[in-house]
Image (cartoon, grey):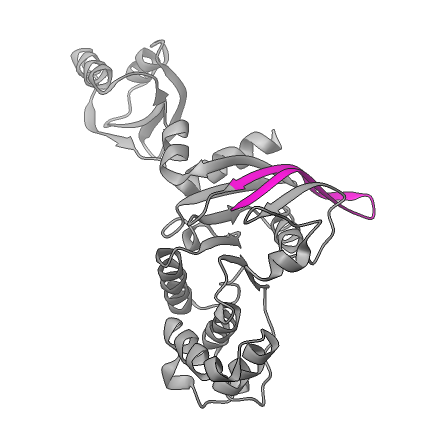
Amino acid sequence: MIVTRDLRVDYDGVTAVRDLNLTIHPGEVFGLIGPNGAGKTSTIRVLATLQEPTYGEVMVGGIDLLERPRDVHRILGYMPDNPPVYDDLRCWEFLDLFAGAYFVSRRERRRRVDECIEQVDLQSKRHVLAGTLSTGMRQRLVLAKTLLPDPLVLLLDEPASGLDPLARIELRELLRRQGERGRTILVSSHILTELSEFCTSIGIMEKGRLVISGRIDEIITRFTERKRLVVDLHPPSDAAIAWLTDRGQVSGLERINGRVEFDFTGTDDDVVELLRLLVATGAPVRGFFEKRMGVEDILLKVGAREVS
């Protein structure tokens, strides 16, 4: 549904997006993750036809975005970071205004406004002035506006920016439901917890580059070929640590708060054998577990690798 090839975006000699090759399949909910300045917004602005790339190819829904931008507009919904609303319009009036701008016929306009209000759970605010809404409710209103033309593709740039924790959870649920409706969604954020619980795939950007991309479960598997094991030694034992360090399958050993953490290459049976041999040396093992890696750990690992 979204494909970029060798996409590059330069601003006054500074490269914001560098040779981006991205593929997002139909019906996917794709989270674009990275720190501020990583190139997320520049990427989304190109896809929204608001920024012309320096070079590269962009396809949205099988349409060449650079050659046929108006055709892309017909299937696209874009929600920027901190979008404005008309404070002196009631919520339904605000949506009715934009339904007309989207060329929704007068016969269909009331029905479409009602549908979008329901989709974002804004029924109780229908007759309330937009200027009196909380930040979370304003985001819902703008999301409803973005849904008015019934787009196949949603581009959402930092949609949870400025929201309190409860509003973040509610927005995340709304976006998850939109994904279940079959829309292809690209959503950016620098906060992993906003994305990892409802996205099917993620891409991690650093310094304008896409450093990793794919389905969340596949990425976790790729980064967990080595198990991260934790052994609680009480009292601490230099002899046990020296024994572990000498094992060929052990690497990256660290002492952390009385525990020993290390990477281990091997099967589950190999882990059992390692623990058996460690205990047989007389090591004072009080506890033992495998530390599961999540998406947050992967981002930290990738970020450290890029910096180095």
Q: Residue at x 20, y 16 (%)?
A: 269
Q: Exactly how many numbered labels are in the figure? A: 0
Q: Residue at x 18, y 14 (%)?
A: 282
Please state which of residues 10 and 265 is positioned toward the viewer in this rendering.
Answer: 10
Horizontal and vertical percent position of residue 26: 45, 47
Which quadrant is home to the C terminus? top right
Q: Is residue 81 magenta?
A: no
Residue 272 against residue 23 in the figure, above or below: above
Horizontal and vertical percent position of residue 176: 37, 58
Q: Which residues are magenta?
A: 1-23
The prevailing secondary structure element of the residues shown in magenta is: strand
Horizontal and vertical percent position of residue 147: 48, 68
Q: Residue at x 70, y 49 (%)?
A: 66
Q: Quadrant of residue 166?
A: bottom left
Residue 273 against residue 48 in the figure, above or below: above
Residue 52 against residue 172 in the figure, above or below: above
Please state which of residues 281 and 296 is positioned toward the viewer in this rendering.
Answer: 296
Q: Quadrant of residue 228?
A: top left
Q: Is residue 19 magenta?
A: yes
Q: Which residue is situated farthest in the right direction here?
A: 12
Horizontal and vertical percent position of residue 74: 58, 62
